Amino acid sequence: MSERSILDLDILEFFERVTKLKPTPAQIELLLSLTDPEVTKIAISAGRQTGKSLTCSVAAIYLSLHNKEGIILASAQDNWIYSHIRDVFNNNPELKEYIVSEGVFSIVPLKGYETTSGSKVHVRGSTDKSLRGIPASIVFCDEAALLSDESISTALGNVSGKYKFVLLSTAPRERKGLFYQIICDPQEYGFRLFKWSAENCSWHSKNLLETKKKMLGQWYKPEVLGEVLEETERGILDSKHIDACVKDRPFYLEGGSVECGLDWASGDRAKTVLTIIERIAGARVKVVFIRAWNLDEMANIFDNITYILRQYKPKFVKVDAMPFQYSEDLKKYYSKKIYTVDFGEFDRGCTLKDRMLGQLIHKVQTHQLEIETSQTELIKQLKKYKRGKRYGDDYVDSLCLALYLDPEKFKPETHGCAYFPPNYNKAGGYEGNKRSFQFTKKTKDSKKQ
Protein backbone atom coordinates (compact mmCIF):
# COMPACT_ATOMS: atom_id res chain seq x y z
CA MET A 1 0.00 0.00 0.00
CA SER A 2 1.49 3.32 -1.09
CA GLU A 3 2.17 6.07 1.44
CA ARG A 4 -0.55 8.71 1.66
CA SER A 5 0.11 12.09 0.08
CA ILE A 6 1.39 14.67 2.52
CA LEU A 7 -1.58 16.89 1.69
CA ASP A 8 -4.02 14.15 2.74
CA LEU A 9 -2.76 14.11 6.32
CA ASP A 10 -4.51 15.85 9.19
CA ILE A 11 -2.49 18.28 11.30
CA LEU A 12 -1.38 15.71 13.89
CA GLU A 13 -0.31 13.20 11.23
CA PHE A 14 1.42 16.00 9.33
CA PHE A 15 3.38 17.01 12.46
CA GLU A 16 4.68 13.47 12.99
CA ARG A 17 5.49 13.03 9.31
CA VAL A 18 7.56 16.20 8.86
CA THR A 19 9.25 16.34 12.29
CA LYS A 20 9.63 12.58 12.98
CA LEU A 21 8.44 13.43 16.51
CA LYS A 22 5.37 12.53 18.53
CA PRO A 23 3.61 15.68 19.79
CA THR A 24 3.10 16.12 23.52
CA PRO A 25 -0.45 16.52 24.87
CA ALA A 26 0.11 20.29 25.08
CA GLN A 27 1.33 20.41 21.48
CA ILE A 28 -1.65 18.34 20.30
CA GLU A 29 -4.10 20.75 21.90
CA LEU A 30 -2.28 23.73 20.37
CA LEU A 31 -2.06 22.18 16.87
CA LEU A 32 -5.79 21.51 16.84
CA SER A 33 -6.52 25.09 17.90
CA LEU A 34 -4.11 26.55 15.34
CA THR A 35 -5.99 24.79 12.55
CA ASP A 36 -9.47 25.42 13.97
CA PRO A 37 -11.02 28.34 12.01
CA GLU A 38 -13.24 29.20 14.98
CA VAL A 39 -10.24 29.97 17.20
CA THR A 40 -9.00 33.38 16.12
CA LYS A 41 -6.69 34.63 18.90
CA ILE A 42 -4.11 32.47 20.66
CA ALA A 43 -1.49 33.34 23.31
CA ILE A 44 1.25 30.87 24.26
CA SER A 45 3.36 31.33 27.41
CA ALA A 46 5.78 28.44 27.84
CA GLY A 47 9.26 27.68 29.09
CA ARG A 48 12.27 27.76 26.80
CA GLN A 49 12.91 24.78 24.51
CA THR A 50 9.44 23.37 25.04
CA GLY A 51 8.44 23.15 21.35
CA LYS A 52 6.20 26.21 21.02
CA SER A 53 8.03 27.66 17.99
CA LEU A 54 8.28 24.25 16.30
CA THR A 55 4.55 23.63 16.81
CA CYS A 56 3.65 27.02 15.32
CA SER A 57 6.02 26.51 12.37
CA VAL A 58 4.42 23.18 11.46
CA ALA A 59 0.95 24.75 11.70
CA ALA A 60 2.09 27.66 9.51
CA ILE A 61 3.35 25.25 6.81
CA TYR A 62 0.18 23.16 7.01
CA LEU A 63 -2.04 26.23 6.63
CA SER A 64 0.05 27.62 3.78
CA LEU A 65 -0.19 24.35 1.85
CA HIS A 66 -3.95 23.85 2.26
CA ASN A 67 -5.28 27.38 1.81
CA LYS A 68 -4.73 30.62 0.00
CA GLU A 69 -3.48 32.66 2.94
CA GLY A 70 -1.38 35.71 3.66
CA ILE A 71 0.82 34.73 6.60
CA ILE A 72 3.20 36.98 8.57
CA LEU A 73 6.00 35.52 10.69
CA ALA A 74 7.19 38.33 12.99
CA SER A 75 9.82 38.03 15.68
CA ALA A 76 11.58 40.32 18.16
CA GLN A 77 14.87 38.43 17.72
CA ASP A 78 16.00 35.58 15.45
CA ASN A 79 12.90 34.24 13.73
CA TRP A 80 12.77 30.74 15.15
CA ILE A 81 9.48 29.91 13.45
CA TYR A 82 11.06 30.61 10.07
CA SER A 83 14.18 28.64 11.10
CA HIS A 84 12.02 25.60 11.89
CA ILE A 85 10.10 26.03 8.62
CA ARG A 86 13.36 26.03 6.68
CA ASP A 87 14.49 22.83 8.49
CA VAL A 88 11.17 21.10 7.80
CA PHE A 89 11.38 21.86 4.06
CA ASN A 90 15.04 20.81 3.87
CA ASN A 91 14.33 17.53 5.69
CA ASN A 92 11.24 16.72 3.61
CA PRO A 93 12.17 16.95 -0.10
CA GLU A 94 8.61 16.06 -1.16
CA LEU A 95 7.53 19.54 0.02
CA LYS A 96 9.64 21.24 -2.67
CA GLU A 97 6.99 20.72 -5.32
CA TYR A 98 4.61 22.98 -3.35
CA ILE A 99 7.03 25.97 -3.37
CA VAL A 100 6.69 28.40 -6.30
CA SER A 101 10.40 29.31 -6.29
CA GLU A 102 13.30 28.07 -4.18
CA GLY A 103 15.75 30.20 -2.27
CA VAL A 104 19.51 30.48 -2.83
CA PHE A 105 20.76 29.12 0.51
CA SER A 106 17.85 26.79 1.27
CA ILE A 107 14.60 25.63 -0.24
CA VAL A 108 12.70 28.42 1.49
CA PRO A 109 13.78 32.00 0.54
CA LEU A 110 15.03 34.22 3.38
CA LYS A 111 12.19 36.75 3.16
CA GLY A 112 9.44 34.17 2.89
CA TYR A 113 7.89 31.88 0.33
CA GLU A 114 4.86 31.35 -1.88
CA THR A 115 3.04 28.04 -2.24
CA THR A 116 1.27 26.54 -5.24
CA SER A 117 -2.03 26.93 -3.37
CA GLY A 118 -1.59 30.71 -3.51
CA SER A 119 -0.39 31.38 0.05
CA LYS A 120 2.27 34.04 0.64
CA VAL A 121 4.39 33.75 3.77
CA HIS A 122 6.27 36.91 4.83
CA VAL A 123 9.21 36.86 7.26
CA ARG A 124 9.48 40.17 9.12
CA GLY A 125 11.29 41.79 12.05
CA SER A 126 9.76 43.48 15.06
CA THR A 127 9.66 47.14 14.04
CA ASP A 128 6.47 48.97 13.27
CA LYS A 129 7.89 49.95 9.88
CA SER A 130 8.74 46.37 8.83
CA LEU A 131 5.26 45.13 9.76
CA ARG A 132 3.06 47.91 8.46
CA GLY A 133 1.06 47.49 5.25
CA ILE A 134 1.35 43.72 4.72
CA PRO A 135 -2.09 42.16 4.08
CA ALA A 136 -2.55 38.88 5.95
CA SER A 137 -5.13 36.57 7.42
CA ILE A 138 -2.71 34.79 9.78
CA VAL A 139 -0.02 36.37 11.99
CA PHE A 140 2.51 34.64 14.25
CA CYS A 141 4.43 36.95 16.65
CA ASP A 142 7.36 35.07 18.16
CA GLU A 143 9.13 36.32 21.32
CA ALA A 144 6.03 38.47 21.87
CA ALA A 145 7.16 39.46 25.38
CA LEU A 146 9.96 41.45 23.73
CA LEU A 147 7.74 43.10 21.12
CA SER A 148 6.60 46.65 21.75
CA ASP A 149 2.89 47.30 22.18
CA GLU A 150 3.02 49.34 18.95
CA SER A 151 4.45 46.40 16.96
CA ILE A 152 1.81 44.00 18.28
CA SER A 153 -0.94 46.49 17.49
CA THR A 154 0.45 47.06 13.97
CA ALA A 155 0.64 43.31 13.32
CA LEU A 156 -2.97 42.91 14.47
CA GLY A 157 -3.98 45.79 12.24
CA ASN A 158 -2.76 43.85 9.18
CA VAL A 159 -5.22 40.98 9.54
CA SER A 160 -8.66 40.89 8.01
CA GLY A 161 -11.40 38.42 7.10
CA LYS A 162 -11.38 35.02 8.80
CA TYR A 163 -8.17 35.74 10.67
CA LYS A 164 -5.87 34.03 13.18
CA PHE A 165 -3.58 36.05 15.45
CA VAL A 166 -0.98 34.14 17.48
CA LEU A 167 1.36 35.50 20.19
CA LEU A 168 3.99 33.14 21.57
CA SER A 169 6.85 33.70 23.99
CA THR A 170 8.66 32.61 27.09
CA ALA A 171 6.82 34.11 30.06
CA PRO A 172 7.85 37.78 30.40
CA ARG A 173 10.23 38.79 33.15
CA GLU A 174 8.81 42.29 33.40
CA ARG A 175 5.31 42.89 34.70
CA LYS A 176 4.38 45.22 31.87
CA GLY A 177 3.49 45.26 28.19
CA LEU A 178 0.56 44.05 26.12
CA PHE A 179 1.66 40.41 26.02
CA TYR A 180 1.94 40.37 29.82
CA GLN A 181 -1.56 41.84 30.14
CA ILE A 182 -2.99 39.28 27.72
CA ILE A 183 -1.58 36.20 29.44
CA CYS A 184 -2.65 37.53 32.84
CA ASP A 185 -6.23 38.10 31.67
CA PRO A 186 -6.78 36.30 28.34
CA GLN A 187 -10.59 36.46 28.57
CA GLU A 188 -10.51 40.25 28.75
CA TYR A 189 -8.76 40.34 25.37
CA GLY A 190 -10.56 37.34 23.85
CA PHE A 191 -7.51 35.06 23.66
CA ARG A 192 -7.23 31.34 24.23
CA LEU A 193 -4.20 30.84 26.49
CA PHE A 194 -1.82 27.89 26.31
CA LYS A 195 0.80 27.38 29.03
CA TRP A 196 3.21 24.53 29.56
CA SER A 197 6.42 23.77 31.41
CA ALA A 198 9.76 22.26 30.44
CA GLU A 199 9.30 19.93 33.41
CA ASN A 200 6.62 18.13 31.38
CA CYS A 201 8.84 17.70 28.30
CA SER A 202 10.69 14.38 28.06
CA TRP A 203 13.74 15.92 26.36
CA HIS A 204 14.57 17.94 29.51
CA SER A 205 16.40 15.66 31.95
CA LYS A 206 15.82 15.94 35.67
CA ASN A 207 19.53 16.62 36.17
CA LEU A 208 19.43 19.54 33.74
CA LEU A 209 16.29 20.96 35.36
CA GLU A 210 17.93 20.78 38.80
CA THR A 211 20.94 22.65 37.45
CA LYS A 212 18.70 25.33 35.96
CA LYS A 213 16.80 25.64 39.23
CA LYS A 214 20.05 26.38 41.08
CA MET A 215 21.49 28.72 38.47
CA LEU A 216 18.41 30.63 37.34
CA GLY A 217 17.06 31.42 40.80
CA GLN A 218 13.83 33.42 40.56
CA TRP A 219 13.93 33.23 36.75
CA TYR A 220 13.35 29.46 36.83
CA LYS A 221 9.64 30.13 37.00
CA PRO A 222 9.30 32.13 33.73
CA GLU A 223 12.20 30.50 31.85
CA VAL A 224 11.34 26.87 32.65
CA LEU A 225 7.80 26.74 34.03
CA GLY A 226 6.36 29.39 31.70
CA GLU A 227 4.80 31.25 34.63
CA VAL A 228 4.88 34.97 35.41
CA LEU A 229 6.55 35.95 38.67
CA GLU A 230 4.36 37.51 41.31
CA GLU A 231 5.62 40.81 42.71
CA THR A 232 6.55 39.16 46.02
CA GLU A 233 8.65 36.57 44.15
CA ARG A 234 10.72 39.04 42.19
CA GLY A 235 14.28 39.87 43.16
CA ILE A 236 15.01 43.55 43.56
CA LEU A 237 18.11 43.38 41.32
CA ASP A 238 18.33 42.46 37.65
CA SER A 239 20.80 39.67 36.88
CA LYS A 240 22.20 41.50 33.86
CA HIS A 241 23.22 44.45 36.05
CA ILE A 242 24.76 42.14 38.66
CA ASP A 243 26.75 40.34 35.93
CA ALA A 244 28.04 43.72 34.72
CA CYS A 245 29.42 44.36 38.22
CA VAL A 246 31.36 41.09 38.37
CA LYS A 247 35.03 41.41 37.42
CA ASP A 248 37.34 38.53 36.56
CA ARG A 249 40.44 39.89 38.31
CA PRO A 250 41.80 40.14 41.87
CA PHE A 251 41.18 43.34 43.83
CA TYR A 252 43.77 45.34 45.76
CA LEU A 253 43.41 48.45 47.87
CA GLU A 254 43.97 51.64 45.87
CA GLY A 255 44.17 54.20 48.66
CA GLY A 256 40.45 54.97 48.78
CA SER A 257 38.10 55.10 51.74
CA VAL A 258 37.84 51.67 53.41
CA GLU A 259 34.59 50.83 55.20
CA CYS A 260 33.16 47.77 56.91
CA GLY A 261 29.69 46.22 57.26
CA LEU A 262 28.98 43.51 59.83
CA ASP A 263 25.70 41.56 59.89
CA TRP A 264 25.16 39.27 62.88
CA ALA A 265 23.68 35.79 62.50
CA SER A 266 20.06 35.44 63.62
CA GLY A 267 18.65 31.92 63.43
CA ASP A 268 20.02 28.42 62.84
CA ARG A 269 20.45 28.89 59.07
CA ALA A 270 22.03 32.34 59.26
CA LYS A 271 25.65 33.41 59.19
CA THR A 272 27.58 36.34 60.60
CA VAL A 273 29.13 38.12 57.62
CA LEU A 274 31.78 40.85 57.56
CA THR A 275 32.33 42.81 54.34
CA ILE A 276 35.12 45.25 53.58
CA ILE A 277 34.64 47.73 50.73
CA GLU A 278 36.77 50.50 49.28
CA ARG A 279 35.31 53.70 47.84
CA ILE A 280 37.34 55.03 44.94
CA ALA A 281 37.18 58.53 43.47
CA GLY A 282 34.40 58.72 40.90
CA ALA A 283 31.80 56.77 42.95
CA ARG A 284 33.33 53.33 42.28
CA VAL A 285 33.04 50.83 45.11
CA LYS A 286 35.02 47.59 45.31
CA VAL A 287 34.21 44.62 47.53
CA VAL A 288 37.73 43.74 48.69
CA PHE A 289 37.10 41.19 51.45
CA ILE A 290 34.31 38.99 52.86
CA ARG A 291 34.41 36.62 55.82
CA ALA A 292 31.49 34.53 57.10
CA TRP A 293 31.03 32.53 60.30
CA ASN A 294 28.49 29.79 61.01
CA LEU A 295 26.83 29.64 64.43
CA ASP A 296 29.19 26.86 65.54
CA GLU A 297 32.19 29.09 64.76
CA MET A 298 31.21 31.93 67.09
CA ALA A 299 33.56 31.02 69.97
CA ASN A 300 36.46 33.23 68.85
CA ILE A 301 34.51 35.52 66.57
CA PHE A 302 35.34 38.78 68.35
CA ASP A 303 39.06 38.04 68.19
CA ASN A 304 38.69 37.20 64.48
CA ILE A 305 36.72 40.37 63.72
CA THR A 306 39.15 42.57 65.65
CA TYR A 307 42.09 41.07 63.78
CA ILE A 308 40.45 41.79 60.39
CA LEU A 309 39.55 45.36 61.38
CA ARG A 310 43.10 46.07 62.50
CA GLN A 311 44.37 44.70 59.19
CA TYR A 312 42.13 46.84 56.98
CA LYS A 313 41.75 49.90 59.27
CA PRO A 314 38.27 50.90 58.02
CA LYS A 315 37.17 54.51 58.31
CA PHE A 316 33.68 53.40 59.38
CA VAL A 317 32.61 50.13 61.03
CA LYS A 318 28.83 49.79 60.62
CA VAL A 319 27.30 46.94 62.61
CA ASP A 320 23.81 45.47 62.74
CA ALA A 321 22.28 46.70 66.00
CA MET A 322 20.64 43.34 66.72
CA PRO A 323 21.38 41.33 68.76
CA PHE A 324 22.36 44.22 71.00
CA GLN A 325 24.76 42.19 73.16
CA TYR A 326 26.96 41.25 70.17
CA SER A 327 27.72 44.87 69.39
CA GLU A 328 28.45 45.61 73.05
CA ASP A 329 30.81 42.62 73.27
CA LEU A 330 32.67 43.73 70.13
CA LYS A 331 33.31 47.14 71.69
CA LYS A 332 35.26 45.41 74.46
CA TYR A 333 37.68 44.05 71.86
CA TYR A 334 37.80 46.88 69.32
CA SER A 335 38.54 50.29 70.80
CA LYS A 336 37.72 52.50 67.81
CA LYS A 337 34.29 53.91 66.96
CA ILE A 338 31.58 51.37 66.03
CA TYR A 339 28.34 52.59 64.48
CA THR A 340 25.31 50.42 65.20
CA VAL A 341 22.54 50.48 62.60
CA ASP A 342 18.96 49.39 63.33
CA PHE A 343 17.51 48.06 60.04
CA GLY A 344 13.97 48.76 61.23
CA GLU A 345 14.53 52.35 62.38
CA PHE A 346 12.09 54.68 60.63
CA ASP A 347 13.76 57.85 59.44
CA ARG A 348 12.70 60.52 56.92
CA GLY A 349 9.83 58.56 55.43
CA CYS A 350 11.31 55.04 55.25
CA THR A 351 13.22 52.43 57.22
CA LEU A 352 16.99 52.42 57.21
CA LYS A 353 16.84 49.01 55.48
CA ASP A 354 14.90 50.55 52.58
CA ARG A 355 17.41 53.37 52.34
CA MET A 356 20.32 50.93 52.33
CA LEU A 357 18.65 48.82 49.63
CA GLY A 358 18.09 51.96 47.58
CA GLN A 359 21.79 52.77 47.74
CA LEU A 360 22.69 49.19 46.81
CA ILE A 361 20.28 49.18 43.85
CA HIS A 362 21.76 52.44 42.57
CA LYS A 363 25.32 51.09 42.73
CA VAL A 364 24.34 47.89 40.91
CA GLN A 365 22.18 49.52 38.22
CA THR A 366 24.88 52.09 37.43
CA HIS A 367 27.56 49.36 37.51
CA GLN A 368 29.57 51.33 40.08
CA LEU A 369 29.86 48.27 42.31
CA GLU A 370 32.71 45.86 41.56
CA ILE A 371 32.74 42.24 42.80
CA GLU A 372 35.34 39.56 42.18
CA THR A 373 34.15 36.40 40.38
CA SER A 374 35.38 34.40 43.37
CA GLN A 375 32.65 35.91 45.59
CA THR A 376 30.13 33.32 44.40
CA GLU A 377 27.91 33.35 47.49
CA LEU A 378 27.47 37.12 47.41
CA ILE A 379 26.66 37.04 43.67
CA LYS A 380 24.14 34.23 44.18
CA GLN A 381 22.42 36.02 47.07
CA LEU A 382 22.26 39.29 45.11
CA LYS A 383 20.46 37.53 42.25
CA LYS A 384 17.98 35.86 44.60
CA TYR A 385 17.45 38.74 47.01
CA LYS A 386 13.83 39.72 47.64
CA ARG A 387 12.23 42.10 50.10
CA GLY A 388 11.16 40.39 53.30
CA LYS A 389 13.58 37.50 52.81
CA ARG A 390 14.11 35.65 56.09
CA TYR A 391 17.31 33.72 55.36
CA GLY A 392 19.94 33.48 52.64
CA ASP A 393 20.46 37.25 52.74
CA ASP A 394 23.39 37.57 55.15
CA TYR A 395 25.93 38.56 52.49
CA VAL A 396 23.60 41.15 50.99
CA ASP A 397 22.77 42.70 54.36
CA SER A 398 26.47 42.89 55.24
CA LEU A 399 27.17 44.60 51.88
CA CYS A 400 24.27 47.00 52.49
CA LEU A 401 25.81 48.00 55.81
CA ALA A 402 29.23 48.48 54.25
CA LEU A 403 27.79 50.63 51.44
CA TYR A 404 25.46 52.65 53.66
CA LEU A 405 26.12 56.38 53.50
CA ASP A 406 24.53 58.92 55.80
CA PRO A 407 26.52 62.12 56.46
CA GLU A 408 24.41 62.88 59.52
CA LYS A 409 25.14 59.51 61.14
CA PHE A 410 28.70 58.79 60.06
CA LYS A 411 31.15 61.58 60.79
CA PRO A 412 34.86 60.83 60.85
CA GLU A 413 36.75 61.84 63.95
CA THR A 414 39.33 64.59 63.41
CA HIS A 415 42.79 64.38 64.89
CA GLY A 416 45.97 66.45 65.10
CA CYS A 417 44.54 69.97 64.79
CA ALA A 418 43.43 72.56 67.33
CA TYR A 419 41.59 75.79 66.52
CA PHE A 420 41.66 78.90 68.70
CA PRO A 421 38.79 81.31 67.98
CA PRO A 422 39.53 85.05 67.72
CA ASN A 423 38.77 87.46 70.55
CA TYR A 424 35.27 88.84 70.52
CA ASN A 425 34.48 92.50 71.27
CA LYS A 426 30.84 93.48 71.76
CA ALA A 427 31.36 96.89 70.21
CA GLY A 428 33.58 95.98 67.28
CA GLY A 429 32.91 92.27 66.82
CA TYR A 430 35.81 89.85 66.26
CA GLU A 431 39.35 91.07 66.82
CA GLY A 432 42.68 89.49 66.13
CA ASN A 433 43.65 86.77 63.69
CA LYS A 434 42.57 83.15 63.40
CA ARG A 435 45.33 80.86 64.54
CA SER A 436 45.64 77.16 63.96
CA PHE A 437 48.39 74.90 65.15
CA GLN A 438 49.29 71.63 63.42
CA PHE A 439 50.63 69.23 66.04
CA THR A 440 51.42 66.34 63.74
CA LYS A 441 54.07 68.24 61.76
CA LYS A 442 56.06 71.31 62.73
CA THR A 443 56.58 74.01 60.11
CA LYS A 444 58.61 77.21 59.94
CA ASP A 445 55.41 79.24 60.13
CA SER A 446 54.22 77.47 63.28
CA LYS A 447 57.53 78.08 64.97
CA LYS A 448 57.33 81.79 64.19
CA GLN A 449 53.85 81.95 65.74
Image (spheres, helix red, strand yellow):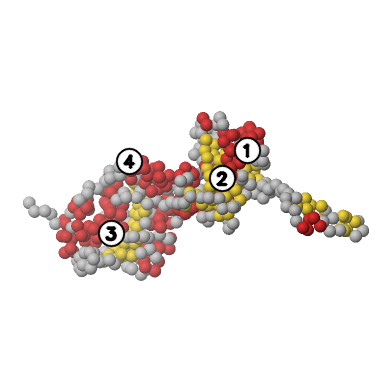
Q: Could you tell me which quadrant the C terminus lies in?
A: bottom right
Residue 321 image label: 1
> Label 2 to label 4, Cα distance in Å?
37 Å
Q: Position of residue 169 (x, y in %)?
A: 36, 54
Q: Amino acid at mark 3?
A: Ser
Q: Which residue is mark 2?
A: 276
Q: Which residue is mark 3?
A: 83
What residue occupies the far right of the structure in this picture? 427
For marks 2 and 4 on the same chain, the one whose residue lies earlier in the sequence: 4
For mark 2, give the secondary structure. Answer: strand
Residue at 22% of width from left, 64% of height from top? 106
Q: On the image, which quarter does residue 214 sit in?
A: top left
Q: Nearer the viewer, residue 297 or 227?
A: 297
What residue occupies the far left of the structure in this picture? 1
Q: Which residue is mark 4?
A: 207
Instruction: Point out the frontmost of discs 2 and 1.
Output: 2
For marks 3 and 2 on the same chain, the one whose residue lies earlier in the sequence: 3
The reply to whether residue 242 is in sight is no
Q: Nearer the viewer, residue 229 or 181?
A: 229
Contact (Cβ within 8 Å) of mark 1 with mark 3? no
Contact (Cβ within 8 Å) of mark 4 with mark 3? no
Q: Position of residue 287 (x, y in %)?
A: 53, 48
Residue 335 image label: none
Q: Nearer the viewer, residue 275 or 117?
A: 275
Residue at 30% of width from left, 44% of height from top? 204
252 left or right of 5 in image? right
For marks 4 and 3 on the same chain, the one whose residue lies earlier in the sequence: 3
